[in-house]
């Protein structure tokens, strides 16, 4: 049994080396980002016919090969603002920011790290009613400025999905430790198949 698992793990490691995207300069031009569109330096997708709560939005973005957007700079926010105005959404849109783990400590659900950029609407975040733990962006004022606001995670808004790029850890290697016990190796095997399936779907 252990020998079979070892063979499978080695095969998966070799498969990911050859199947993972190339880091060449042409990768940007050859990758299939559909339905994501390039806005600024990233690729995004907003489904204008689907409103969901924050949790459903996260699952939806994952199902199409992305994550809820993690806005990292004013430049990115302004690029999204221009796009939202162009497609005339005119409503709130979910991001991946939240303080679900600890009140007042806003983190990116995608990275697990504290948010590196915020631009709040006036007097926010305010955790109104003690149940506003997820961050949405909305167009505010006569100038239609895209700003952040904490809101109830169960409210239904549009989702801003950003394309999930495979990292070196995702695409290049699985840790193959050949002296592990059977349970650890089975877990690694399951994780390996999951990563390989994600890579295959992103390349399909």
Image (cartoon, rainbow, N blue to C red):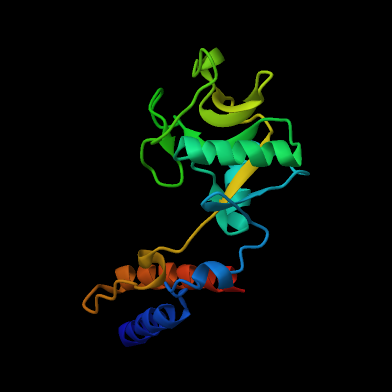
Residue at 59 percent across and 30 percent down: it is 137
- Let me know if residue 110 appears in the view: yes
Q: Is residue 180 left or right of residue 140?
A: left
Between residues 51 and 44, which one lies in front from this camera angle?
A: 44
Q: Is residue 100 above or below residue 168?
A: above
Between residues 185 and 100, which one lies in front from this camera angle?
A: 100
- Let me know if residue 54 appears in the view: no
Quadrant location of the C terminus?
bottom right
> Which residue sits furthest left?
179
Residue 136: name its quadrant: top right
Between residues 82 and 55, which one lies in front from this camera angle?
A: 82
In x, y percent, where is residue 200?
55, 74
> Which residue sits furthest right?
49
Q: Is residue 148 above or below residue 10?
A: above
Residue 186: name its quadrant: bottom left
Q: Is residue 32 above or below residue 52?
A: below
In x, y percent, where is residue 147?
56, 26
Residue at 49 percent across and 19 percent down: it is 125
Quadrant location of the N terminus?
bottom left
Q: Is residue 66 left or right of residue 24?
A: right
Q: Is residue 48 left or right of residue 100?
A: right
In x, y percent, where is residue 19?
47, 79
Counting labels gives 0
Residue at 34 percent across and 83 percent down: it is 10
In x, y percent, where is residue 68?
55, 45
């Amino acid at each position: 049994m252990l020998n079979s698992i070892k063979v499978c793990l080695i095969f998966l490691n070799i498969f990911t080396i050859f199947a993972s995207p190339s880091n060449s300069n042409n990768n940007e031009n050859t990758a299939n980002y559909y339905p994501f569109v390039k806005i600024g330096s990233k690729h995004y997708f907003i489904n204008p016919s689907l409103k969901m709560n924050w949790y459903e939005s996260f699952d939806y973005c994952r199902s199409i090969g992305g994550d809820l957007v993690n806005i990292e700079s004013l430049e990115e926010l302004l690029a999204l603002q221009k796009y939202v105005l162009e497609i005339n959404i005119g409503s709130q849109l979910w991001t991946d920011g939240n303080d679900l783990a600890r009140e007042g400590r806003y983190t990116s659900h995608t990275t697990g790290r504290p948010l590196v950029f915020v631009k709040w609407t006036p007097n926010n975040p305010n955790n109104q009613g003690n149940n506003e733990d997820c961050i949405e962006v909305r167009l505010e004022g006569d100038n239609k400025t895209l700003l952040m606001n904490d809101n109830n995670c169960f409210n239904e808004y549009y989702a801003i999905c950003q394309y999930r790029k495979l990292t070196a850890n995702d695409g290049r290697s699985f840790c193959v430790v050949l002296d592990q016990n059977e349970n650890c190796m089975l877990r690694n095997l399951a994780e390996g198949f999951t990563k390989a399936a994600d890579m295959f779907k992103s390349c399909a």
